[in-house]
Image (spheres, rainbow, N blue to C red):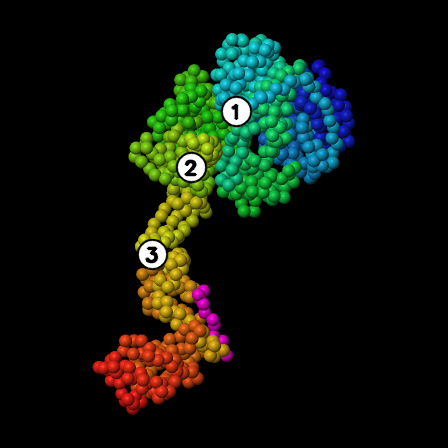
Amino acid sequence: MQHLPIDSLLPEIITSLCHFPNLVLEAAPGAGKTTRVPPALLEAGIAGDGEVLVLEPRRLAARLAARYVAAERGERLGETVGYQVRFEEVAGPRTRLRFLTEGVLARRLLSDPQLEDVNVVVLDEFHERHLQTDLALALLRRLQLQTRPELRIVVMSATLVAAELARFLGACPVLRAEGRRFEVEIEHLTRPDNRPLAAQVASAVRRLVSEGLEGDLLVFLPGAAEIRRAQEACAAIASEADLLVLPLHGELPAAEQDRAVRPARQRKIILSTNVAETSVTIDGVVAVIDSGLVRIASYWPWSGLPALKVARISQASATQRAGRAGRTRPGRCLRLYTAADFAARPAHEAPEIERLDLAEAALALHAAGITDLASFDWFEAPPAPALAAAEKLLRRLGAIDERGELTAIGKRMSNFPLHPRQSRLLVEAEARGVGGAGCVIAALIGERDIRASTILQDQSKRRSAGAAASGPSDLLQRLDLLLEAERVNFAPERLRQMELDPAAVLGVERVRRQLQRLLKPKSSRSLVSEGASERELLLAILAGYPDRVARRRSLSDDLSSASGDLLLSSGGRAQLSAESVVKRAEYLVAVDVEDRRESGLLADRKSWKRSHTIIVRLASAIEPDWLLDLFADALRETTEAQWNAQAERVELIQRLVYDQLVLDEKRSDEADSEEVTRCLAEAALAAGWQTFTDKDEVERFLARIEFMRQTFPEAEFPLPDETDVRAALVELCAGNRSFAELREAARRGGLIALLRQKLTSEQARLLAAMAPEHVAIAGRPQVRVNYESGKEPWIASRLQDFFGMRAGPRIAGGRLPVVLHLLAPNGRPVQVTKDLAGFWERTYPQVRRYLSRRYPRHAWPEDPLNT
């Protein structure tokens, strides 16, 4: 057996675990921790009669490590050593050492909460901080503290914050081991390369080949699409140099992944995503080309929409990638980015718990009986908004109740190794008797698209193909394609003729079979013979995506011109992909959504534009009545008053709303409504109260009140102001809905009447008696008394109206004489006085001579008191 650096530390590891239940192990890449530590624990009896579980971050790593350890033991895989990943297990009754992915452990904890046959759990490559790894660590520590103190937990990684982990694990020991790493020559670009990534890769490959590449080449790319393009770009070089070009990513079948990592007679160019970043050493790799990019999954908390974006890797990840070239001999690493770019990158990636949808983890915790997720003891707690969003979704799906307890639907959902959305879809399909087809739909959503993207490279061709098709659901269209594939026995050549991806089809079919085994017997009929109801399947899809309902903004009989603009129930807008077959439905569910954010220079090369578009790639039609059947609690009736400025009136609109999406709208003539009053009042206040009533009349009334406050302070009259007038105007709006009606109400004295209501009955009596609106004089029975702020009350009338009067009227119970404006026939005052008797005696003779000459037709007696 080949000696590895970790071997010298194995005795110390065993000794530590004999005295302490937990251990943190730091070991550099190439040390051999993945393949040597777990079997050493088994052989030393640390697990007793139980199993050793080893959690790996990826399926590829789990399968490779299990195969490697079994080979070193001289056994067949599946005997003492086995592995278990999602929908695949190679193990037997004698298996004691099992490599598995983190999600598998989380599900095992649900079915076997005590892990009765497991005594040691090893969490490998913890530094990658997958969400399921964090969840597994927290659940294991909880189990250890509550009922399984003898359970051993070992956390291993190349780069991690050991002190914090050791503290979380009860101040456990920390051991370190050096790796076996040869010198790696790292070269950066001197300046950024703006060519397409595939062209950059091809140039780097040609350079290494021309400089005498003596082994295999590992190229790190962000995703499967970039791998396909690079594969085409490198085809000519590979042919010239007799090189195999092999892809390596998580969507490939196991056989194709194995072909990429196993030794071959020809030198290889392995085009890989970050699945090869941390796993068992790939023998033969002597050079690495690092794009510096990775495709990471996240989601937008504000909308709950998933996001998949290409991002720059961290410095730690770049170091890991470069180290792949120095595992077995000195190597080279060409980085397709500059040294300054590397220096500006973050030291580590953000943990998935900070950026991923937590719904699946939240369901697992609730299924484990943990109702208060906010107080759950995580190694690092997730963001509170993300946790709240996850629980909100689970309640929306009917998985948990308001107390956080699992419902009957939630218990059934937890039996499926799927995202809660797909689990809910499958539970609904099972309840409606279409479980078999529901398994296909769930698999189609969770796995790679079965359409052969390499065949339809021309996007215009694909769009035209999509435009020609029409149907109720993109998922049902793919269901039909899978049925056709089943009828031809999944023959690869026939699938290619149908423009399907054979590997993707087989992947969906494999998942479908696994899910079907989990269904109740009555739902496990053959897919082809099931005759699944289209309506029941569409309802099942809706059940899994209640917050993704959308409405088309406009419809057209012409499918080629049908609008793809959508309004989302969560708020905002989206664009339906031109490839979607859902052409006629007004209402639909957005199943697969991409939140696309792009930026770039405008045509003028001076302005920077940022665009944000939500693209619905997979949709499924629904009927609005189904929302009432499934989600009546999410429907509400709203009444909204809108102001029509042109007509100067309120229009009342009644709506039936689902979340933020309007399903039905109608106008109402109802006037006696708080909404109508509010809207009319806002418009009236903006226009000003003077628009609706005589300003002078209101000001006279306010001045009367001010006069009473000054004259009779003991009566404690209020001091009305502009605010009181505006408040009265708002009250006057009740029962009206237009400016015309409001003016009429004000004309009838409504505004003054409302202001008068602010007085007590005694104050109102005093106002009428002591500050009358009119007084009588000799020539007129009623003359209006004018009240103005800061002035004495006064009246105005023709001079002749005062003939025969020795004194003018008095108010305030006779306390105060009013000021008299004595007017000439032309309406202009000839005298302003409070002393009428004095005016007759001293001033009238002169005034009489002037007025008699100017107005000879009027009588101007010499003795006005006796006329």
Q: Nearer the viewer, residue 26 or 767?
A: 767
Q: Are marks 3 and 2 in contact (CB under 8 Å)?
A: no
Q: Which residue is mark 1?
A: 223
In which quadrant of the rendered view does residue 834 lie?
bottom left
Residue at image mark 3 = 649
Residue 530 image point, x, y percent: 41, 29
- Going by the numbered disc 3, the residue's amino acid type is Arg
Q: What SS does tag 1 mark?
A: loop
User: Which numbered disc, 1 or 3, marks the residue that appears first in the sequence?
Assistant: 1
Residue 716 belongs to the span the image colors magenta: yes
Q: In the image, what residue type sits under mark 1?
A: Gly
The secondary structure type at the circle numbered 2 is strand
Q: Is residue 761 above or below residue 70?
A: below
Q: Residue at the location (41% across, 73% down)? A: 788
Which residues lie in the magenta part? 714-724
Asked whether the beta carbons under mark 1 and mark 2 sit within 8 Å of each other, the answer is no
Q: Which corner quadrant of the image does residue 48 belong to? A: top right
User: Left or right: where does residue 91 sit relative to residue 554?
Assistant: right
For residue 587, which quarter of the picture?
top left
- Under mark 2, the amino acid is Ala
